[in-house]
Image (cartoon, rainbow, N blue to C red):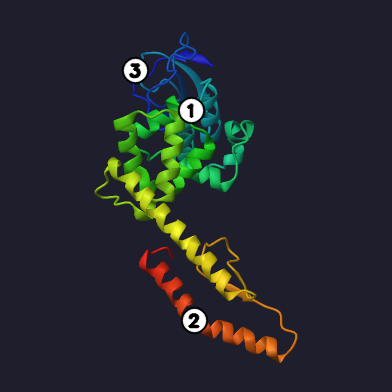
Amino acid sequence: MELKKINEIPDRELFNWYFDNSDINDNNIYPPLLASINKKYYQLNKCNLIVKEYLYLGELNYLDALNISINQKKNINVIEISNILYITDLLNLDISEIDFFYNNNLEGETLLEALRKVRVYPYEIKKYIVSKKISFKFIILISKYFDIIGKILEQYIKEFSPTISEFRKYLYLLIDYKDYIDLKNFNFDEISKVVQKKNKQYYLFYDKYNEIKKILSPIKVENLDNFETSQLTFSFVISNYIDYKNILNKLTENKEQLNEFYSFLKKYDIY
């Protein structure tokens, strides 16, 4: 390691993973780190600074250079994690060999894919989740539904500067009612109306479902997937032919009620 002056401008883009140059003054007494990789100079930290003299580390490979670059910053936020993941993928490096991910137990494809997507969040969302230290649990949710609700979420943050609890509540609302919101012409005043309307529909739905269960008794009527689908399962016990005949009559007599039930689902686009 030595102080080195070079006549050319090093690459300051590849390892420029800081967000808003946060903590750019970490280890401020030292000049930026410089490495040679495949006969090309790279600045490994403080990439917004242009200096005449560097702390030269010699010839390195991309993996060692990235690990060293990451180790220069004390506190790494979620945006920067996403940026580091981008560099890791760009250089085709194995995540398991990046010390930061191992030391912080960052693993699992669901989490890593969510973190990768953070890089393309709008600036307002990035700034918000960093300032509020939004947990990985909610980062996973945002990333999963980002293509659908990302613009509305950005607009919400800009207009209302929500508290963490308000943000969480609204995130859940957007996810739960995403299929019933006009995403292109969204009005924040309208979401309460959407919620009230859909809740009313679901109350009616359960009323009709319970009515079906009642009129078909002793036939047992169930939905076995927690109403992920509209499929109903009928089950019954017979001890003789008379029981069987009574069950058939019960089903026949109430076929119109079943028709009305499924017509209701279709009308309100519940399934």
Marked residue nearer the N-terminal end (1 or 2): 1
What residue type is disc 1 on? Lys
Residue 46 versus residue 184: which sits nearer the camera?
184
Element under disc 1:
loop
| Image x and y of residue 14, in percent | 41, 33
Element under disc 2:
helix
| Image x and y of residue 29, in percent | 47, 8
Element under disc 3:
loop
Depicted 220 relative to depicted 53: above or below:
below
Q: Mark 3 and mark 2 in contact? Answer it, CB < 8 Å.
A: no
Q: Is residue 22 left or right of residue 248?
A: left
Spatial separation of the CA atoms under disc 3 and disc 2: 79 Å
Spatial separation of the CA atoms under disc 1 and disc 3: 31 Å
Q: Which residue is mark 1?
A: 133
Q: Residue furthest right?
A: 239
Q: Which residue is mark 2?
A: 255
Which quadrant would residue 4 be assigned to in this image?
Answer: top left
Q: Is residue 209 visible?
A: yes
Residue drawn at x 55%, y 47% is 110
| Image x and y of residue 8, in percent | 34, 23
What residue type is disc 3 on? Ile
What residue type is disc 2 on? Lys
Quadrant location of the N terminus?
A: top right
Task: Check residue 50 in the rendering and tell me which mark sits there, or answer none.
Answer: 3
